[in-house]
Amino acid sequence: MAVLVAGGAGYIGSHTAVALGEAGRDVVIVDNFVNSSRRAVDAVRVLSGAEVALVETDLCDGDAVRRVFAQHPITEVVHFAAHKAVAESVGEPLAYYRNNLDSLLGLLEAMLDNGVHRLVHSSSCTVYGQPEALPVSESAPLGAESPYGRTKLMGEQIITDVCAVRPMDAMMLRYFNPVGAHPSGTLGEDPNDVPNNLVPLVMEVACGRRETLQVFGDDYDTVDGSGVRDYIHVVDLAEAHVAALDVLAGGYRGAVAVNVGTGAGTSVLELIEAARRATGAAIPFEVCERRAGDVAKIWAATDLAAGLLGWQATRNIDDMMADHWHWQRHHPDGYRR
Ligand code: NAD
Ligand code: WQD
């Protein structure tokens, strides 16, 4: 019995593979390394102490996916593999729809062909678009505003439709803003080229690779005018996947979307303060124009995760910054060093 971790060499997938191994599951990582490194899989093997098989293939190749099911005793699937850069998706919509939807369709077909019915799928708070009320609950109106976000919405719809008529059960986890790294400092986020997200950029300033941070707007209706997000430690997020698989194994039937956040908002300026505490660095910043498409503030309602998964986040913003910094300090070039 093994869990197929699609995209398991990536940032969230690799941390989840460790948590799954620690929970006693054998893991089969399938990845084409389009946005990750084999070294992450090496680190997963060391940290998890579990059997971790690796299949290097493109999940959009349906025949290759079927071979994975033929060659490994897969009983459950966690699907992370996707392109995830919002701005890039606006310029390359077809690449996003092709990759993010083909990989999902092929996995669902192979699961049905092989009698595998337990799926945990990576969704995102981006499906809420501009939230009308906070904290945002799973029943809030949906409306993604980028091709990337729409692949997440469509993914949820496809899974829901399949679960309605076939033996398939799914937890679609809507992640808020994952940050941090494994506390060992050997596994973490390794963005290609220029990072898109706040925390990797903050860490680049902290280690002197970048002179200043740009703060996108200080005139929002928030605690200090800067944007507010629900940052969640990637190890807490990884543990939510183990909890979701356990609930599916316990007999949960159907498809459900579940927020995975802390329930607390942190502003950009508050996050910079936390990063200063963790790093001891000054982290200079300049306030710039708002970034197009940004929401002012969003954080998760967490009661469904608590009630259904029996899970809640345990790590705070200081833990997130300390662990991210530990990784960044030892791996300034990610897995390349
Ligand atoms: P990531 O890029 O680090 O990991 C994705 C992994 O999938 C990579 O290892 C990549 O090589 C692999 N992959 C992509 N397409 C593939 C394909 N066709 N075949 C095989 N492998 C493929 O991203 P992440 O941050 O770990 O995100 C994981 C999932 O969580 C994604 O679905 C993403 O949309 C979702 N998500 C991420 C965030 C975030 O801020 N990181 C927030 C919400 C949701
Ligand atoms: C966080 C805050 C910025 C960079 C993105 C995706 C979303 C989801 C999570 C996948 C905002 C501010 C940022 C900078 C800044 N991913 N910021 N200066 O935009 O909440 O969400 O990642 O599903 O879909 O859109 O994350 O880290 O880019 O920004 O001031 O240089 O930091 O304005 O308030 P975001 P982020």
Image: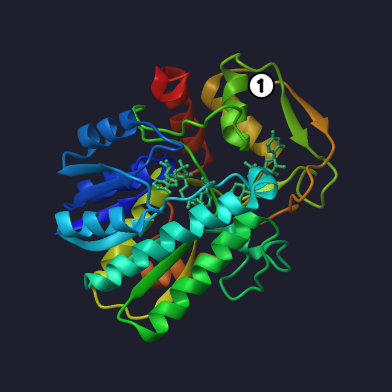
Q: Is mark 1 within 8 Å of ligand 2?
A: no
Residue matched to label 1:
283
Residue 123 spot, x, y in % from top left: 50, 60
Q: Quadrant of residue 14?
A: top left
**Residue 218: x, y in percent?**
82, 40
Residue nearest the observer in this picture, 107 or 18: 107
- The amino acid at mark 1 is Ile
x 69%, y 49%: residue: 90
Q: Quadrant of the C terminus?
A: top left
- Name above or below for residue 209 compared with residue 89: above
Residue 17 place in picture, x, y as percent: 29, 46
Residue 230 in sight:
no
Other residues around mark 1 within 10 Å, as few (<14) / some (14–19) / many (≥20) = many
The residue shown at (62%, 62%) is: 150
- The residue at the point 25 percent across, 63 percent down is 76
Residue 179, x across and y down, in percent: 50, 40
